[in-house]
Image (spheres, coloured by chain):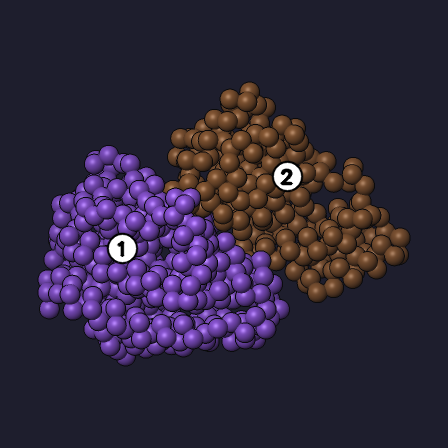
Amino acid sequence: MSDKHRRVLDALELREPDRVPVMDLMNEFSTCNAILEKKPNPLGKMLRDPRASKLMDRLFALPGSAQLTDREMERFTHLGAAAAVRMDYDAAWLSCFPVLRFRDSRTMTDIFGRLCDVSVDAAGNLANPIYREGLIKSPADWNAWPKRDILRLPEKVNRVFREVQQAYGDRLFIFAFANYGLFENAWQPMGFERFAVAARKEKDFLRRVIRFYADLHCMLVEAAADAGVPGFIHTDDLAYKSGPMLSPRLIDELFGEHYRRLTETARALGVKIVMHSCGNTTSLLEHFVSWGFDAVHPLEPTAGVDLAAAKREVGDRLCLIGNLDITHVLVDATREEVFEAVRQAISDAGKGGGFILAPDHSHPDISVQRLRWMVEAAREYGAYPLKNQDMRG
Amino acid sequence: MGEYMERVKSALANLEDDDLASLLREALEAGEEAADLLAAMSEAMVEVGERFEAGEYYLADLVLAGEVMKDGVAVLEPHLSAGDKGAKGTVVICTVKGDIHDIGKNLVGTMLSSAGFQVVDLGVDVPADKVVEAVKANSARAVGLSVLLTTMVGSVGEVVDSLKEAGLRDGVKVAVGGACVTDEVVERYGADAMGRDAVEAVRIFSGWME
């Protein structure tokens, strides 16, 4: 076992490693390309060029164009791993996401029923698509929705992560990300207004959808484990700025048993499983423990999550990951500000182990220089036994 | 408050929405005034907001209440006079240029309408000049900007600057909401306030219209 694996595993199992591990979310072409000093893929610029985009419109209408998109997304998983190794991260969230389907140069769907706008960042990189609305509005829509590509996802995920694990797994603890979470896949393909009504009045329909995706997620964990990947990220934004989007009681009623099945599957396979939920998740922390997750990310400071309080509440049962702000600290803060944010996070959550430092999200404007400062600061403040701790930590 | 008013208020506040539209029709046929029924629904939405702030209701409940409210208003609409609506003042709302997320913006619109504001909803991905045009055309006194994407937060500054250039800024307050909005964003781009959710947004705009 490499030092990095041991370090990450110690943190996940709530022991003190030699130092606080550092990980990142390799979810943006722009960040990965900047780290590796690569130029953007020409696809982004072509999508924004009026003449080229007309050509792309015709190309995307051809049968088989989905394979090109899938190949690009598979390439992205390798790109993310290479960038994470270059940054000397201990761990990385790597996405294998062959689920996007261009409708034309401006819009895309995914295989789950989201309609999105194509997004290209300032440098010309393809960015994460921007959710517009759901295409599955009723049980009849769900029954009619083509599921072949969804059902083939575990095989693709297995193949891509096998390659990536073989190429980079000795230098990186890989957390596989391969699908939206159960809650997100329940609401986004129908839209939140429609979901809010269904959560009250059409629970049987919702339960069918959730069960389908829970089965799929268990297969994805199996696929990742079979590929040799040691970690899995279940990304499911259950909360927003001021708290959970549904009552925690209703979340538990609709999703709890499925989260438990997912974490039991991971545990049986020896895979560590992380719950990622943006927003203020403070009132959900005990649920994350009861559902069996090993860790939670990102504990967003700008959503009002108090990392020290989270550590006090669940730090003896749940590894905490994240907390570095991406609205200012990792975008345009000074070196001193980045160092102070890292010092504070480690002081708040590092005591006794069970903390992995990471950005609280990804977006194209994150500065690679500030990511480097984050790593540097983690080396300075993160060696155990910890120094520079606040008394409240 | 009459029997129908109590039943309407209770149905909406308790999210017992199955029969609200038929209840409203029944009340209209029984001779109740549409404006009074609308007032009862507005009171119910205030109660929904209070329950949200107390932690009894969650975002999905607010959205559900908003959907029920919209269905109810659709029943009442043909029976309402212009004076029954939007008495508190006019607010222009939109999701800023480059961003198309609209759950929060829609909810703010519904809650503001319920609270008696005239709401001009410009939709999503709205450039600054369109906001200025709408403020002028509707003599709006306030603007609500929604932005979820961190990369698009600069669009808030574009709206504030455009209002200044048009000579409107002194008479128009600007509130911002959305996942990436912080106090620092408000200060950096020269907005006036940040709302963490739709209920807080109503409080902010109500304060400005007093």
Q: Position of residue A322 (x, y in %)?
A: 29, 53
Q: Residue at x 25, y 37 (%)?
A: A337
Q: Position of residue B35 (x, y in %)?
A: 80, 45
Q: Is residue A50 above or below residue B189?
A: below
Kind of residue indicated by mark 1: Met
Q: Residues within 10 Å of mark 1 (few under 14, many from 20)?
A: many
Q: Is residue A373 visible?
A: yes
Residue nearest the observer in this picture, A54 or B2: A54
Q: Which chain is purple?
A: A
Kind of residue indicated by mark 2: Val
Residue farthest to the bottom, as pictured: A268
Write down the colour of chain B.
brown
SS at mark 2? strand
Q: Is residue A46 left or right of residue B165?
A: left
SS at mark 1? strand
- Label ID, residue A293: none
Q: Residue at x 88, y 56 (%)?
A: B30
* Quadrant that contains the N terminus of chain A: bottom left
